[in-house]
Amino acid sequence: MKKLSTSNRILLLLAVFTLIPSFFTPLWQISLWAPQYPEGLNMKIWIDHLSGNVDQINGVNHYIGMKHIGVEMFPEFTYLTYVMMGMIALGLLFFLVGRRWSLYAFFGLLNAFGIAILVDMYIWGYEYGHELDPKAAIKVEGMSYQPPLIGYKELLNFLAYSGPDTGSWILIGGVSMLGIAMFRDFREKKLLA
């Protein structure tokens, strides 16, 4: 098994370090704007809690029959910290191994994790936006209120946005470093062939 070049091992180690800010920065954000909220309402999703205007968002959503947003809605908060610590430990192990396969394995692991999180968020958003209280004060026949997974969406008189926050952008930077290392590794392999 071919060893990684020193520069690619450094890129792998830097990518591992990009996981650490996920403990201290918000990973995702959901924002809402409406005529009555021109400054917007914002909810930040961290690795183990929520912050921002969660109470105001719950107040607005109550009228259309959406469930109360709370930490208890997200069982992921109970184990995501441990998953992230495990990925850091694996990343450090892959760095110590320093073989080509370890670079590709860590890249695959981070991408699989990212896809799993997006699928989980989509399912949560679908259930949250479709399972409405039939006794809600405001009912619009055939209307669902699923927030966008990524990007903007109009929901009645609200404009909703959902997307990565600081921690996720740092993680995306780490995955990009792995992509650069893989490109360099592929190029080195081609030159030696």
Image (cartoon, helix red, strand yellow):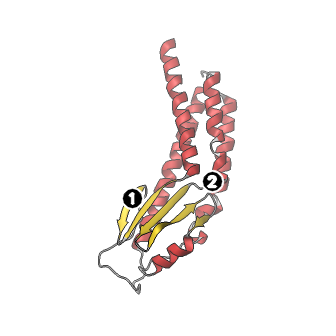
User: In this picture, is 135 found above or below 192?
Assistant: below
Horizontal side, residue 112 vs residue 154: left or right:
right
Please state the horizontal and vertical placement of residue 77, each as a whole percent of the image.
62, 62
Residue positioned 67% across, 30% down in the render: 97
73 vs 153, nearest the viewer: 153
Q: Residue furthest left?
A: 141
At label 1, the amino acid type is Tyr
Percent across and percent down for residue 161 are 43, 60
Asked if disc 2 and disc 1 are in contact, CB closer than 8 Å, the reply is no
Quarter occupied by the N terminus: top right
The quadrant holding residue 160 is bottom left
- For disc 1, the marked residue is 152
Label 1 residue SS: strand
Q: Considering the numbered disc 2 on the image, is that residue within a helix, a strand or a loop?
A: loop
Residue 25 - label: 2
**Which residue ends up furthest to the top in the rendered image?**
192
